[in-house]
Amino acid sequence: MSTAKRSLGLWMLIALVIGNIIGSGVFVLPAALAPYGAASLLGWGISLGGALMLALVYAWLAQIVPNYGGAYAYARRAFGDRVGFIVAWSYWVCVWSANAAIAVAFAGSLGAVWPAASSTPWHGALCALAALWFCTFISLSGVREAGYAAIITTSLKLVPLVVFGALGLGWVHASAFHPFNPSHLPLVNVASAVAALTLWAFLGLETATVPTGVVRDPQRTVPRATVIGMAIAGVATMLACTVVVGMLPADVLHASAAPMAEAARRTWGGWAGIGIGVVATVSCFGALNGWVLLQAQTTLAPALDGLFPRAFARLDKRGTPWFGLVLSSVLASALIVSNYSRTLVALFTFTILLSTAATLVPYLITVLAWWRIDLTGSRWRRSVALGALAFCVWALIGTGAETLMWGAVLLLAGVPMYLWQRRALVGRTRVARG
């Protein structure tokens, strides 16, 4: 990768991490957490701690393994091609299914400002598709253009989000947290289910490690961007979501497609609801832009190594892997269309659980890869890695049977491509030797 194509610096990368973490989850997730009431705080705490430990593991690996491709590169170095393919495939599924969820959340947020955008499930689906493909065209324009868009949208959403969280603390009603556990499930079950949902709000912590081939001074820039971006986004997200839960009645919270905008409207008036709706719309769009950029890079490294079809390694004149970008958007579109009859909240909940289950596999294998690669790690680092490993296993169980089933189906769908690519690779090797 030439220096000319290394277009992302520290601030662009930090903005990309924050922008990919602070996206749809902070604005829509409170509705999915409504059935658990104040007990959801347990899951939030566990998710934040687990995400911070994972961010540290990714930062350490970025210093040791400068390879292009993030978790895929770490897994391949530690365990070989087979495990590397599993991670690459699973993460790719995570990315395009995440884009479907973010696009749906964008439609819900826009509906708070312009009701016609989500007045029917079909309208919401069309709105989501329009946003997805607009961001796809931005990424086709080039990596640097997508990086500038990340800086602008991150700035437009981070400051209002922090201000909302700080001001909202004064309007939290204690009655909103009673009963503590309205689901009446055992607290350990609640914490596990909530951790699986809230982890969605922290997905993206690994963002900086994926496009290292287009990052300036990656061994220094990537770890700094990972830790700084995760810390800022994590605290802001948890604060804002907790405030929303404390500002709205449970029934209103559960039914709202844009709960943060609803909380602002009820507390400070219609203008505030519209303002938060605009911020949420910008936020979702910014996250969608960042994740679409990521999906363009996710399949490039395994394609260059021969584990994905060569088509995924095709670059246009701007250096963008256009085939993987377009195909990923097609798959995300299919997920949106096939589930458009669900309500926006139900569709959002299903897609975030699917995406979370898909990304927990790369997270889990990444932690195991660190144990195998960094044989001289300190006791403190080993303790952090052990905590990250336990968190991944626990959160994966918390996604539920249906989500695990769909995740397994999507993972198994990659087996034919792996076998085909291995056969082709063996054939090319024999020809070269002959």
Image (tube, rainbow, N blue to C red):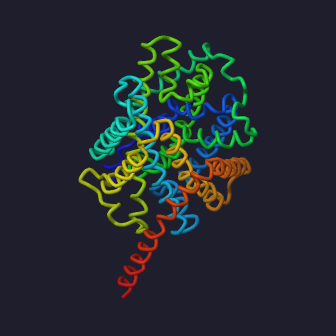
Quadrant into which the N terminus falls: bottom left
Residue 381: percent from the left, percent from the top?
Answer: 69, 49
Q: Is residue 54 above or below residue 433?
A: above
Residue sitting at x 66%, y 51%:
397
> Would residue 245 be found to the left or right of residue 185 on screen?
left
Quadrant into which the C terminus falls? bottom left
Q: How many marks?
A: 0
Q: Nearer the viewer, residue 219 or 109?
A: 109
Q: At 45% across and 15% down in the image, what residue appears? A: 272
Q: Give coordinates of residue 358: x percent, y percent.
A: 53, 53
| Residue 271 falls left or right of residue 385 | left
* In front of the other: 433 or 321: 321
Rendered residue at 50%/36% (across/down): 345
Q: Name, please, the residue furthest toward the left.
A: 317
- Looking at the image, the residue that sits furthest to the top is 269
Judging depth in this view, the residue of 411 and 203 nearest the camera is 411
Q: Quarter-wise, where is residue 245 in the image?
A: top right
Residue 428 relative to residue 254: left or right: left
- For residue 292, above or below residue 433: above
* x and y percentages locating residue 365 in the rendered image: 60, 58
**Percent position (x, y) of residue 313?**
34, 61
